[in-house]
Amino acid sequence: MIASKLKLGDEIRVIAPSRNLTEVRQDVHHHAIDFWIQEGFTLTFSKNSRETDKLHSSSIASRVEDFHAAFCDPNVKMIITCLGGFNANQLLRRLDYDLIGHHPKLLCGFSDISALTNAIYAKTGLVTYHGPHFSTFGFDCALEYTKNAFFNCVMTDEPFSVRPSKEAETYHTIQEGFCEGTVIGGNLCTLNLLQGTPYMPDIRNKVLFLEDDNIMGPYFRYEFDRNLESLLQTEGADQIKGIVFGRFDDSCGMSVESIKELINDKVPSNIPVMFGVDFGHVFPMITFPIGGTVRISADKDCAKIQILSH
């Protein structure tokens, strides 16, 4: 199920299911508002988006209320999160998935929001989007690339190719191969929170898009390695069709060689594996559809991605 695409003049609702809007720097907040107005959209903010507790979030009840209100409002055509954080999975048991399924909307965010985008796809079949937050559009870092990739995904129905940004330069082939399949993924440690719950998408026959942020300092690679191992122990992981790794902050110490070491003996040798694609906790970033379809073509000289349905 794919929600109606965004059109100029549509209302976009900013919600705060993880950290709240007060955590967005004022200059970033104002620049992001200016961005949406200049692009021709109407922007509204959820009722409780500025409610604050000791965890820089708001109560579970307030966040659920805002979530349901955004999906129920017939004027709202897209829902975008203000920030990530650490506690979006608190909402999963309280969300009304029948309500969401009967009022399909575009929903976009990344990082901690991966818990919501993957769970909603798993429970309703609604395609969701791993992509920029509201706050992302308040930064000038390669904004044109992020903007174009975002609008390609949420405003058009046509298949499109994903091209490397100037910052990425090229996408790297780790294992050669070709596949087409449905995408799940996003932030790896957040996705793993769904294991063993009713909110985890079936991993069989999926293409995994995976990234992570450095919250472990010098121990990042150890943490990423065991999180990847955990995901690949999920039932059906032997039937995955391909893996695409995003870009990592320099502090993570991730490289082509380190990814090759990490996946050694972990993944089937006959599936394509790519590294350095423009998504993650770095600028700029693509938007990709969780529940949409991609085509991956990776050989030693070239690694290509096409988003087929989104």
Image (spheres, grey):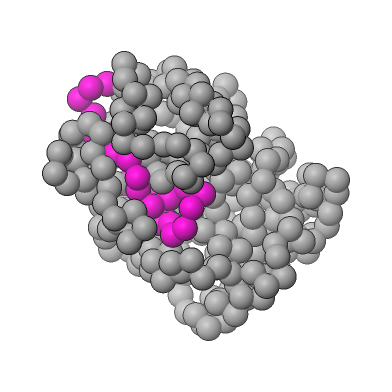
Please say if 217 is above or below 154: above
Q: Is residue 166 magenta?
A: no
> Which residue is depicted at the point 27% across and 47% down?
171
In the picture, measured across the screen, residue 226 lies left or right of residue 12, that is left
| Relative vertical location of residue 42 with respect to residue 103 in this rendering, above or below | below
Q: Is residue 77 above or below residue 65?
A: below
- Residue 164: % across, % down: 30, 56
The image quarter containing residue 196 is top right
Magenta segment: 268-293
Residue 210 in sight: yes
Expressed as whole percent of the image width and height from the top left, the position of residue 280 reads 47, 48
Is residue 245 toward the left or the right of residue 104 in the image? left
Corner quadrant of residue 172: top left
Residue 207 seen in this snapshot: no
Location of residue 63 with respect to 160 vertically, above or below: above
Find out whether residue 276 is within the magenta segment. yes
Quarter residue 165 falls in? bottom left
| Residue at (44% x, 17% y) in the render | 233
Q: Nearer the viewer, residue 209 or 94?
A: 209
Question: Is 187 on the left or on the right of 254, as rendered?
Answer: right
x 42%, y 21%: residue: 232
Q: Main secondary structure of the magenta part?
A: loop
Along the viewing direction, whichever of 151 and 216 lies nearer the viewer? 216
**Residue 70 on image: x %, y %:** 66, 61
119, 230: nearer the viewer: 230
* Residue 187 or residue 1, whichever sits in front: 187
Which image quarter holds the C terminus?
Answer: bottom left
Figure label count: 0
Q: Residue drawn 50% across and 34% down?
A: 188
Position of residue 41 measured from the top left corner of the image (x, y, whole percent): 54, 78
200 sits to left or right of 272: right
